[in-house]
Image (cartoon, rainbow, N blue to C red):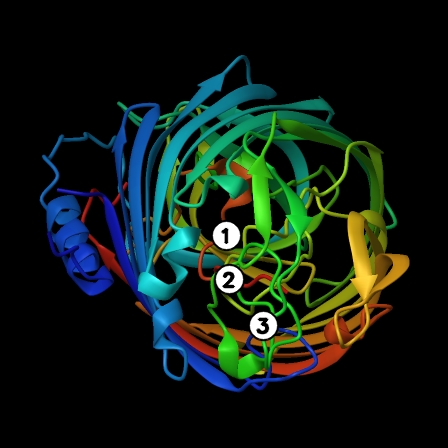
Amino acid sequence: MADSFSLSFSQNMTNNLFQNRFAEKDQLSTFSFYLDKNLSRLSLYAEGSYSYLFKNPNLTYYVQDAGMDYLHPLNEKSAFYFSLAGRGAFYRSDYSDFNYLSANFFAAFKSYFSQTSIFKSNYSFEYKNYRDSVYDFLSHALIVSFDRYFQTNTTFKGEIDWGYKYFLHPYIYEGEVPIEGHRYFMGGRGRGYSDKQGQKPYQTVTQTEGQGLQVFSLSGLIAQGLGNSVGLNLSGVKQWVLSGQNPFSFIEEFYAVENPSYDRFSWDGYQIGSQLTFLVPWNIQLKLGYTLSKKEFPGIESLDLEGNPLGLTRKDNRNQIEVRTEKNFPQFSVFLSYSYISNSSNDLYFDWNGHFFSLGIEWNIPLGARQ
Amino acid sequence: MKQPSEMTLFIVFLIVNLTLPSFGQQALHFYNVDQEIRVEGKIQKITMEPRYKDSPPFLILILEQKNTKKLFQVEISPVWFFDYDFHRGEHLIVIGSLYSSEGMGQNIIAREVQFRGETLVLRDEHGFPNWRGGKGQMRRKGKGKGKRY
């Protein structure tokens, strides 16, 4: 029998599912389970998540994760951690090009240099194989961080991050064939007027040799404790694309649904954020956050609303506020969150704003030993 | 051939995973709900020590109680060594089960830790572990999975 098992349900609502100018409302219900089994220093786990979209049921999907992790202590101050995991994502027919199988290896090392400073380093490798091979990639990422705590209840943390993503089968676009009633569709899925999501790409394409994208970032964090009940975090990250560019004609993000054209490798720019955390009466956690980002997407050309190239690389400025509250009960926990995002872009199709609500419950069912 | 629906896959994986074989574990001590206490204090030392048979070493915090200056060894969890960064000098409130052992002084099996405006729930009210394995610090329990905006 597994050691721990949990079930969770969340209901998510937005007025802008596809996060573009032509805002479309939708609701998303997600059911998940998680369980794990500890075998000495080895832990096995599995997690499944089914998400149903009410107005866009063809984007409904199921994600299954399974993996193992292993903790290897070196001494009383240092330890290695290894994880090997696999994932499968399965979308309904219209979005089945997003289906993928992936493998992930993660190795981490953590050591207390002193009782007030911590060194951490980790490496991750990921391989994803999509049904539409244009998205296939493998990636490597290396992160090194160092933090130090001061008696003023302040922690300073610095981090260096390098990553390399290699697209195995990128396309070269050779021509466009306009489709009446649409702005444009250029590979991948979903771009176009909101009532035409899920159209097939129409461009003539040729598959080419692989193409790499290399990024480097520096980030910093200041965390200030204000008693036991209040915490303040200020963080910033600056990222550079050292080589390569995005192999897609456009990049888009969907709310609560993974879109393979966008990830941490896609952009060059910076992001700063702040977060205030409170413990209010009845042990309720409250978080208030604000994030500002300025991102440029190398290789992505901005277009006007008729689909004509503007000769500019796409640049987005984003402001986001988020409020989240969480209460833990003996057997379950509940949360409620709201965020508002305002995204301005030199590609007007991606000039948008949106409201996002989530309400969730997680139920923990103990199955293992009470040690 | 007709492909299985996402809901069918969800149910199949749920059943298969719940019937994983059982492997026994032996604990040297248990969470005693009748011995639960609340201690507020400052971290004096952080270490990793083996505590249970067939289990990875635990993250242990030596906590100095605010008023009495008494020292407690607070058991956190194995995996959370990578998830949360504790430092000497940080203030914490710990709720957990107190037990004494020869040569180890006063010990607390932590159920809940409060610091910097956050609550970390390590165990349920009966002492059953709440932590998770898998991907170390990249995972967070119940934190709105899958949001990408």
Q: Position of residue B92 (x, y in %)?
A: 63, 53
The amino acid marked with disc number 2 is: Lys
Q: Residue at the spot x=12%, y=46% of the render? A: B16
Considering every residue shown, the one lying at the far top of the view is: A74
Rendering coords of residue A99 (x, y %): 38, 50
- Identify the residue position indicated by label 3 in the image: A179
Nearest to the eye among marks 3 and 1: give it: 3
Labels 3 and 2 share a subunit = no
Of helix, strand and loop, which one carries label 2? loop
Q: Secondary structure at mark 1?
A: loop
**Residues beneath discs 3 and 1 located on the same chain:** no
Residue A93 position by quadrant: bottom left
Q: Which mark is residue B143?
A: 2
Which chain does the residue under circle 3 lie in?
A: A
Q: Amino acid at mark 1?
A: Arg
- Residue A362 falls in which quadrant of the image? bottom left
